Image (tube, rainbow, N blue to C red):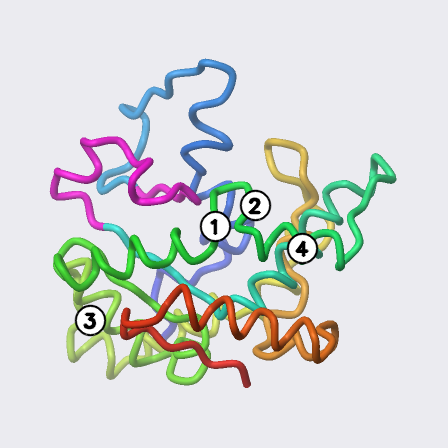
Amino acid sequence: MKHPMFEQNHPLLNKNPHDLVPFLELTLYVDGQVPDFSSFTTPRLLSTHLPFASLPKSAQDSKTKLVYLCRNPKDTFISMWHFSNNLRLHHKDTNSIEEMFDLYCKGMSVYGPFWDHVLDYWKQSIENPNKVLFLMYEEIKEQPKMHLKRLAEFLECPFSIKEENCGVVDEILRMCSFKNLSNLEVNTTGKLSTGEENKVFFRRGEIGDWKNYFTTEMSEKFNYIIEQKFQGSGLKFSYN
């Protein structure tokens, strides 16, 4: 018997994830608005691209749990380049890969230098592992079930033996997979409440796509920057 959470009226099957998990800086605190959190379900689930240092003190010092998802910097760059250009297509004002790569290497990104952003959350996850969970995109792709269970334990709602035995974990992985979400009608034809097309959030989701775009010179330059910035941190990246 299918678990009731996976019936056809499940919100994730009918709405884009970004409409279900609103962004602090993009949808909630916009144009001076102050959101009414009383209408939110408990516990509240929010998303953000803000650096740790830019989070409100209430978020830093409270029992709020933070889940940080990190991807290798080369694929992160390619994803960001495609995404920003897709949003700019309507204005016919896209950036070349060379132009954006130069800015990226100088640390000029919307939310600050990639390395500062990552290192802040990485250090916080080491100093306070009960508050900050640091996840690597590549590791999740390789062992999704293990990391889903790790996430559930971090959020203090671990799966029961009964749930595991009746396939709840496997069904969550299936429903939340890139393949399933990207093929849903709401994500192929729909739009966010803010106007962006849902399909721009689903491109390839593959590891190592940077190899289709980086020149040898670009790769070597970026390797050097990352080696310098992350030296001594204990954080390593997979570039497969």
Mark 2: amino acid: Met
Q: Is residue 126 left or right of residue 71?
A: left
Q: Residue at x 24, y 79 (%)?
A: 164
Q: Residue at x 27, y 74 (%)?
A: 234
The furthest residue to the right: 92
Q: Quadrant of the N terminus?
A: bottom left
Determine if the magenta segment contains residue 158: no
Q: CA distance from mark 2 to mark 1?
A: 6 Å
Q: Residue at x 67, y 71 (%)?
A: 218
Q: Which residue is mark 3?
A: 159
Q: Earlier in the sequence, mark 1 or mark 4?
A: 4
**Mark 3, residues whose alpha carbon is within 10 Å: few (<14), some, or many (≥20)?**
some
Mark 4: amino acid: Asp
Q: Which mark is residue 102?
A: 4
Quarter where residue 47 is shown = top left
Q: CA distance from mark 2 to mark 3?
A: 41 Å
* The magenta segment: 45-65
Q: Earlier in the sequence, mark 4 or mark 2?
A: 4
Q: Which residue is mark 2?
A: 108
Which SS class for mark 1? loop
Q: Earlier in the sequence, mark 4 or mark 3?
A: 4
Q: Which residue is mark 1?
A: 113
Percent x, y for residue 94? 81, 45
Determine if the magenta segment contains residue 55: yes
Percent x, y for residue 105? 58, 57
